[in-house]
Image (cartoon, helix red, strand yellow):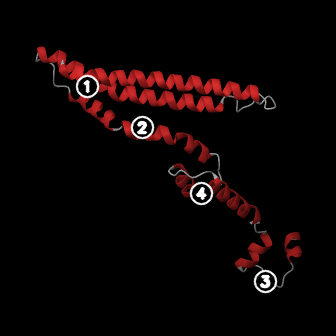
């Protein structure tokens, strides 16, 4: 009983407070987005970017709350089951649920990191021509999109300057056609 009063009670109070604060954050973001739309009437309110910030914030806040709840829900269930089963000793040996609970609690930080960098992953994937190493550096650093834009434009310009080899130049390089033969004659043949 002391464990529930001193640990799980404050823990679930913190979880409820976090859910409340995240809901309040989303509400403020929606209000800010609506006010920005009113101030900037030249931008179309029905475009694809309508409430884009709000949607990202809502998704990130929701995922954070879900991970927080799921990480500690299993452990709470295990502790409640242990407290109930302590009175009657039969049926207390089920280590799978406890193992799953400890697994999720220890991975909560990893899941939070994934939630935190998810918008940067999506943003990095919007540059299809950038190298994966530049994308990875962007995702895990606090740099802007300059490196991604520079790398993507550099690689796109390289692709545009590369010209596909014609049949005559390929055949000449392979040695099937002598260099003295005119390329127009090869193309006509």
| Circle 1 residue | 7
Find numbered disc 2 in the image and state the secondary structure of the residue it sits on. helix
Which residue is disc 3 drawn over?
178
Front position in the image: 32 or 99? 32
Residue 26: quadrant of the picture: top right
Viewer-side label of 3, 1 = 1
Mark pair 4, 1: CA separation: 47 Å
103 displayed left or right of 170? left
- Work out which quarter of the rendered image holds the C terminus and state it: bottom right
Relative depth, front residue between 180 and 114? 114
Mark 4 against mark 2, which lies toward the viewer?
Answer: 2
Disc 3 crowd rating (10 Å Cα; few below 14, some 14-19, many 20+) is few
- For the residue carrying disc 2, how many other residues have a C-alpha within 10 Å: few (<14), some (14-19), or many (20+)? some
Mark 4 vs mark 3, CA separation in Å: 40 Å
Residue 73 appears in which quarter of the rendering?
top left
- Secondary structure beneath disc 4? loop
Tell me if label 4 and label 3 are in contact, CB under 8 Å: no
Q: Position of residue 49 (x, y in %)?
A: 70, 33
For disc 4, the marked residue is 131
Q: Nearer the viewer, residue 31 or 162?
A: 31
Mark 2 against mark 3, which lies toward the viewer?
Answer: 2
| Mark 2–mark 3 distance (CA, rounded to whole Å) | 63 Å
Visible residue check, residue 173:
yes
Position of residue 163 in the picture relative to residue 105 (left or right) = right
């Amino acid at each position: 009983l002391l464990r529930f009063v001193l640990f799980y009670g404050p823990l679930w109070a913190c979880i409820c407070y976090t859910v409340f604060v995240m809901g309040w954050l989303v509400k403020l973001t929606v209000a800010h987005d609506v006010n920005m739309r009113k101030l900037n009437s030249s931008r179309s309110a029905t475009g694809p970017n309508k409430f884009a910030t709000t949607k990202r914030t809502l998704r990130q806040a929701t995922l954070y709350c879900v991970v927080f709840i799921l990480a500690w829900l299993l452990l709470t269930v295990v502790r409640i089951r242990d407290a109930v089963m302590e009175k009657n000793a039969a049926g207390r040996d089920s280590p799978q649920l406890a193992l799953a609970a400890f697994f999720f609690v220890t991975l909560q930080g990893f899941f939070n990191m994934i939630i935190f960098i998810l918008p940067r992953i999506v943003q990095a994937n919007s540059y299809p021509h950038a190298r994966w190493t530049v994308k990875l550096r962007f995702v895990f650093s606090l740099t802007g999109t300059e490196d991604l834009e520079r790398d993507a434009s550099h690689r796109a310009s390289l692709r545009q300057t590369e010209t596909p080899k014609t049949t005559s130049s390929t055949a000449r390089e392979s040695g099937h056609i002598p260099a003295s033969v005119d390329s127009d004659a090869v193309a006509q043949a």
